[in-house]
Image (cartoon, rainbow, N blue to C red):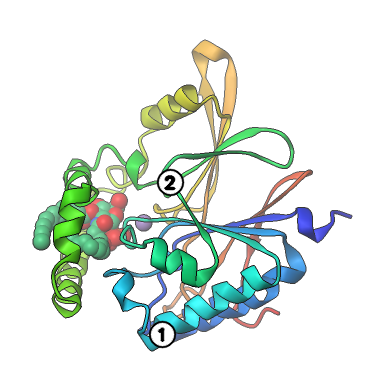
Amino acid sequence: MTDSRAVVLFVSDIHLSAQQPRTAAAFLRFLSLVPARAGSLTILGDLFDSWAGDDDLDDPFIATVVAGLRALASAGVTVQLMRGNRDFLLGEDFARASGLSLLEERHRIGLPDGRPCLLSHGDALCTDDTAYQAFRTMVRDPAWQQAFLARPLAERKGIIAGLRTQSEANKQTKSMAVMDINPQSVARWFIDTGTVVLIHGHTHRPGRNCLRLGDLELTCERHVLTDWDFDGLKPRGGGLAVDADGIHEFSWTEAQG
Ligand code: LP5
Ligand code: MN
């Protein structure tokens, strides 16, 4: 049997917000049980439904999440977090308060079974969604972020609420194919980084896909993480547990413990 400390867990797209209390409760319960099951937890983006800036750390809901993460670090679990398209403004103050380290987009690791693996939120691979990519380029610019963060917190939250509504409306007009990752972009990343496994979230289409890189006669694996939602009609949550035996999907239920 694998030593639980050797297990690495991956989750993403929990979309935590005070307006989704069941999802938050299920995720906090999950966090409290991680120390008994794994030595490390990596969150691949969109932990929060949106993030207006680290000056929101006093918010009572956010403080509860920070305390849940901090307890993991105190129990000796290594916690890492990559920013997603909803919470790319998460910064060092949040990381320090939560006892975790922030990962850059396209983070390369060695899996416990020895294979080189790339971690990503996944939105950067949706290259057919040109409207989103233009928006992404704008908001990932450090000067733009500095100017945005200089606005009052309440004003930022208002802008983000408007954008969320707009984003949901935009998605009704885009095809599923446009909003999925582009296979050529994935192949490019595998070649550029010398990896053979990719783990990402964002698309909310969990599963394992194989990609054959013809020139290299190599089959690469892409694993997509599920999103979490215990407030809607289709309760769901989970992720991947990786150990020396390989990559295993796990699902989480509200009653689990
Ligand atoms: O998030 P989701 O799943 O709904 O859809 C994403 C893409 N949308 C987004 C936008 C976020 O949902 C909005 C919240 C982000 C919080 C950011 C914090 C601070 C930034 C504030 C910026 C003003 O990521 C969606 C994709 C979908 O994934 C699938 O991949 O399609 O993309 C869009 O909907 C973007 C549109 O296509 C383009 C929008 C252009 C709007 C420009 C307004 C600029 C306003 C500037 C104000 C200062
Ligand atoms: Mn996302």
Nearer to us in this view, 211 or 157? 157
At 49% from the left edge and 59% from the top edge, which residue is drawn?
12
Which amino acid type is shown beneath numbered disc 1?
Phe
Q: Where does the image place residue 107, in percent across and percent down from the top left?
A: 49, 41
Crowding at label 2, few (<14), some or many (≥20) Cα neighbours within 10 Å? few
Nearer to us in this view, 163 or 43? 43
At 28% from the left edge and 37% from the top edge, which residue is drawn?
127
Q: Which type of secondary structure does the marked residue at label 1 adopt?
A: helix
193, above or below 208, in the image: above
**Residue tagged 1:** 61
Q: Which of the two labelled residues, at mark 1 and mark 2, occupies the earlier sequence position?
A: 1
**Residue tagged 2:** 104
Which quadrant of the figure has residue 257?
bottom right
At 77% from the left edge and 53% from the top edge, which residue is drawn?
6
Quadrant of the image for the N terminus? Answer: bottom right
In the displayed structure image, the side of residue 218 where residue 93 appears, left or right? left
Observer able to see residue 167: no
Observer able to see residue 213: yes
In the displayed structure image, the side of residue 244 where residue 156 appears, left or right? left
Q: Are marks 1 and 2 in contact (CB under 8 Å)?
A: no
168, above or below 65, in the image: above
Which quadrant of the figure has residue 186?
top left
Crowding at label 1, few (<14), some or many (≥20) Cα neighbours within 10 Å? some
Which amino acid type is shown beneath numbered disc 2?
Glu
Nearer to us in this view, 210 or 188? 188
Q: Where does the image place residue 35, in percent across and percent down from the top left?
A: 72, 69
